[in-house]
Amino acid sequence: MSNLSVNYMGLPLRSPVIVASSGLTTQMDRVKEFEEAGAGAIVVKSLFEEQIVNEAEFLSTQSHEYPESSDYLHYYIRQYSVDRYLTLIKDIKAIVSAPVIASINCYSKGSWTSFAREIERAGADGLELNIYSLPLDIHKRADETEREYIDIVTEIVKNITIPVSVKIGSTFTNLPGFIEMLKGHGAKGVVLFNRFYTPDVDIARMNVTSADAFSHEQDYLAGMRWIGIVSALVPGIDLSASTGIHNGTIALKQLLSGASTVQMCTALYKKGAVAIKNALDDITLFMDKNGYGSIADFKGSLNYSNFGNPGKFERVQFMKSFGGK
Ligand SMILES: Cc1cc2nc3c(=O)[nH]c(=O)nc-3n(C[C@H](O)[C@H](O)[C@H](O)COP(=O)(O)O)c2cc1C
């Protein structure tokens, strides 16, 4: 019988398929279904930095009549958002035995970092930091932006004992070097990659609209190259594949490339909990067929250092592969 258990950021998981952070995790019946289908962990929907900071600032500017109430309002709004979030963590913890990973969506180190302690006290087993802000300052250097990520991680890691992962986008000048820095400042995991809200253009209505929030199967490819490379160049930090994990075959490709876990979101919205069960059945079938007793037996076996031809990972220009076409 294949053993699907894995270790992710020091947390023992019964399977490598994780429920990604999204609104689905606010519905207790869905969360229960995900666990019953075999999910290894649940990442709770994000608490947003702006949700707390902006909401509080907005409301305080509305209360000119009673300026002295502004401090209380700040406290109340902050507390209310936090309390709701902490209750969500406790509710999920009460119905599942799989580890529960809280999530904070943030872009700067600020007063919000103290929430991390409350999240830990609420029973979260880990914390995923979804860090991103669109760089719009043409005078800001890339290393200044990277420093902001490092500062957030340093501040959070100082405050809590549960493991911290960082969910990032793909646009870094030197991704392996950056992940090495995250590791050096205490991150235990990295989620590659987040999928962002993307604008689109409607040429009939001459309007800017929003692109599909959901991923397509081919979207797993961008993350997989980097999982293959980073798992070889930066050992000692766990990688979780996110975006385009629609089925067991894609999950297996990511594990073979060196991912410790894979995260599903779109597949769960579109197919429900059965997507987790089907993926785990496919992984089990693959392991039985190839004689693997555990995920560790094949994890990373096709990554940058284990696959015989690293050039396959390094090739980026079509010219070299399709020069004759
Ligand atoms: C409706 C929806 C809500 C999401 N909410 C969050 C969130 O609160 N926090 C977060 O880090 N990612 C959030 N995501 C991103 C997902 O966790 C995931 O990284 C992304 O959708 C890519 O995975 P997929 O291809 O399986 O959909 C959300 C995605 C969707 C589609």
Image (cartoon, rainbow, N blue to C red):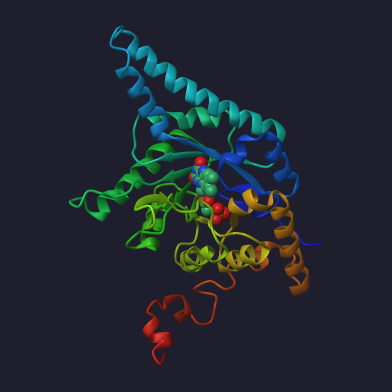
Which quadrant is the C terminus positioned in?
Answer: bottom left
Residue placed furthest toward the left: 139
Residue placed furthest toward the bottom: 324
Report the front residue among 51 and 144: 51
In-image side of 70 versus 24 (left or right): left
Residue placed furthest toward the front: 204
> Based on the displayed image, in which of its 4 quarters is residue 75 positioned?
top left
Q: Which residue does the image show at 39% across and 89% down from the upper left? A: 323
Residue 120 picture location, percent across and down: 54, 32
In-image side of 19 versus 323 (left or right): right
Q: Which residue does the image show at 59% across and 52% down from the upper left? A: 266
Taking 296 as reference, is 8 above or below it? above
Residue 150 picture location, percent across and down: 35, 46
Q: Which residue does the image show at 45% across and 53% down from the upper left? A: 211
| Count of numbered badges drawn on the protein | 0
Which quadrant is the N terminus positioned in?
Answer: bottom right
Taking 247 as reference, is 102 above or below it? above
Observer able to see residue 241:
no
Q: Which residue does the image show at 65% across and 55% down from the upper left? A: 16
In-image side of 137 versus 200 (left or right): left
Taking 183 as reference, is 73 above or below it? above
Observer able to see residue 147:
yes
Residue 97 picture location, percent across and down: 71, 39
Residue placed furthest toward the right: 1
Residue 220 picture location, percent across and down: 53, 63
